[in-house]
Image (cartoon, helix red, strand yellow):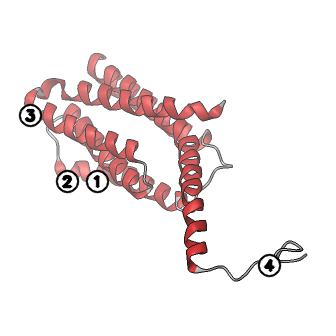
């Protein structure tokens, strides 16, 4: 196999040639990373968005402990979607490390609740939602997923504002608003599944 096509006198590439070639490759690389991210994150975002909506509604309107148990049930379903439905054929080199970070955040959440000692179960739910939203924000920054980072930041801002302005409704507002935002992004990203 010849390095150059027959009859062509191709010289050694210059640094300008290399720069031009890299400039042509960069948009393709970014686009393929975006497509992989969208396909990989669509089901979990949709599942967690729906879980936040359903969980906050159940927790707010069902009497205790039934509401808490039902809310935990929909969260367990979202975890199952994360583990079982995510496409295995699309994997990035950083996914394992970021996935471990998410599991560490989830596993240490009860410890952080013990440290913060929120006043009641609904304040605890808002605290945990805010904590996980910071995780979304950091993950979004880490993998250059600006829509997810924006959702994480938005949830934290809504949580802070509602805890100050309407503390009795903060859990339902944060759950529904955050859930709608996650479900919308997840649903939008499912467009590649056709």
Residue at image mark 3: 164
Front disc: 4 or 1: 4
Marked residue nearer the N-terminal end (2 or 4): 4
* Residue that label 2 marks: 115
User: Residue drawn at (16%, 42%), measured in percent from left and top?
Assistant: 118
Q: How many angstroms separate mark 4 from mark 3 (CA)?
A: 72 Å
Does the rendering let one see residue 107? no
Where residue 61 sits, quadrant-wise, is top left
- Position of the N terminus, as image quadrant, is bottom right
The Cα–Cα distance between marks 2 and 1, rounded to whole angstroms, is: 6 Å
- Which of the image's four quarters has the C terminus? top right
Quick one: label 4, few (<14), some, or many (20+) residues within 10 Å?
Answer: few
Whether tag 2 and tag 1 are in contact, CB under 8 A, the answer is yes
In the rendered image, residue 124, in percent from the top left (x then y), is placed at 23, 38
Q: Secondary structure at mark 2?
A: helix
Secondary structure under tag 4 reads loop
Q: Nearer the viewer, residue 3 or 101?
A: 3
| Residue 83 coordinates in the image, percent (x, y) | 57, 44
Residue tagged 4: 9
Q: Secondary structure at mark 1?
A: helix
Of 189 and 177, the residue lying toward us: 189
Q: Residue at x 53, y 37 (%)?
A: 42
> Which residue bears the numbered disc 1?
111
User: Which label sits in the foreground, 4 or 3?
Assistant: 4
Q: Residues within 10 Å of mark 3 (few under 14, many from 20)?
A: few
Classify residue 36 as left or right of residue 116.
right
In this rendering, the label closer to the viewer, 2 or 4:
4
| Of 26 and 16, the residue lying toward us | 16
Tell me where residue 184 sits by quadrant.
top left
């Amino acid at each position: 196999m010849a390095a150059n096509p027959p009859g062509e006198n191709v010289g050694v590439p210059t640094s300008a040639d290399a720069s031009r070639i890299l400039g042509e490759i960069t948009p393709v690389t970014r686009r393929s990373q975006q497509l992989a991210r969208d396909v990989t994150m669509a089901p979990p975002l949709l599942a967690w968005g729906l879980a936040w909506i359903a969980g906050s509604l159940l927790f707010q309107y069902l009497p205790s402990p039934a509401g808490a148990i039902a809310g935990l049930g929909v969260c367990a379903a979202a975890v199952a979607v994360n583990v079982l439905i995510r496409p295995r054929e699309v994997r990035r080199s950083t996914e394992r490390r970021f996935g471990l970070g998410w599991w560490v955040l989830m596993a240490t959440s009860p410890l952080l609740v013990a440290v913060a000692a929120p006043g009641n179960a609904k304040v605890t739910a808002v605290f945990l939602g805010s904590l996980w939203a910071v995780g979304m924000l950091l993950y979004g920054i880490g993998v250059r997923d600006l829509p997810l980072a924006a959702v994480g930041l938005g949830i934290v801002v809504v949580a802070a504002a509602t805890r100050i302005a309407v503390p009795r409704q903060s859990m339902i507002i944060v759950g529904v608003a955050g859930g709608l935002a996650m479900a919308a992004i997840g649903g939008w990203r499912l467009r590649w599944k056709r």
